Amino acid sequence: MRTVFDPTDPGTNAYDLLTSIVVPRPIAWITTVEADGVGNLAPHSFFNVACARPPMISFTSVGRKDTLRNVLATEHFVVNLVSEDLAELANASSAPFDPEVDEAQAVGVRLEPSDVVPVPRVADSATSIECRLHSSTELGDSHLVIGEVVAITVRTDALVDGRPTMDALRPVSRLGRDEWGHSPEVFRLTRPRRP
């Protein structure tokens, strides 16, 4: 037996259902800067890789948030990894601050200059992805933003054979409601070859 939810029914909260089912979701902790120089830092859990060549990532802004306005105005943003030790700060930065408030300053997150884009990155994040806006598409009450990756930085001690390790990154994820996920337990499966 199953319960069927009609997403077009006003009594159905499709957002709550989808965010409880599409789990775990990686978190893009995005730094942006307004055109007048005010910084913004906010976590977004609708985030993924969008293209391999050229490398692109995507995130979705539900509503017209400060992050989206800044990206559309300046065409640059940085995605920072949220590790277990940064989860509380990432959550704190999700509060509904006024646009003139720099969330990083308000919650005590250290920033440092990025290598390519004119937007700072989170200094204590193990890795960051610097992006230039590729495109933005309005989808209902949301905006899908695709960024072309112009630089990837990884803390050197997090690399083994040139690739980051889960043990070093310790990424957290978003689940349903107010649930978060710890760094995943890792197991390996060899990808099958063509029969």
Image: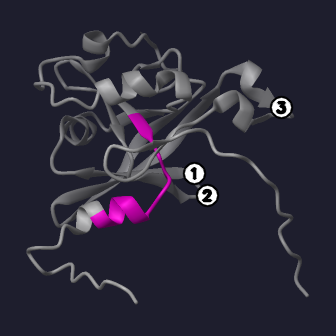
Do the residues under discs 2 and 1 have CB atoms within 8 angstroms? yes
Q: In this figure, which residue is indicated by the disc labeled 2?
A: 52
Q: Secondary structure at mark 1?
A: loop
Disc 1 marks which amino acid? Pro
Reading the chain from its start, which is encountered first: label 1 or label 3?
1
Give the tally of numbered discs. Answer: 3
Q: Residues within 10 Å of mark 1 (few under 14, many from 20)?
A: some
Rendering coords of residue 106 (x, y %): 25, 12
Q: Residue at x 58, y 54 (%)?
A: 54
Locate the C terminus by quadrant. Answer: bottom right
**Relative to 13, is 85 above or below?**
above
Disc 2 marks which amino acid? Ala
Q: Is residue 189 left or right of residue 68?
A: right
Q: Residue at x 88, y 83 (%)?
A: 194
Highlighted magenta segment, given as a residue range: 17-29
Residue 8 in magenta stretch: no
Q: In this figure, which residue is indicated by the disc labeled 3?
A: 160
Frontmost of labels 3 and 2 is: 3
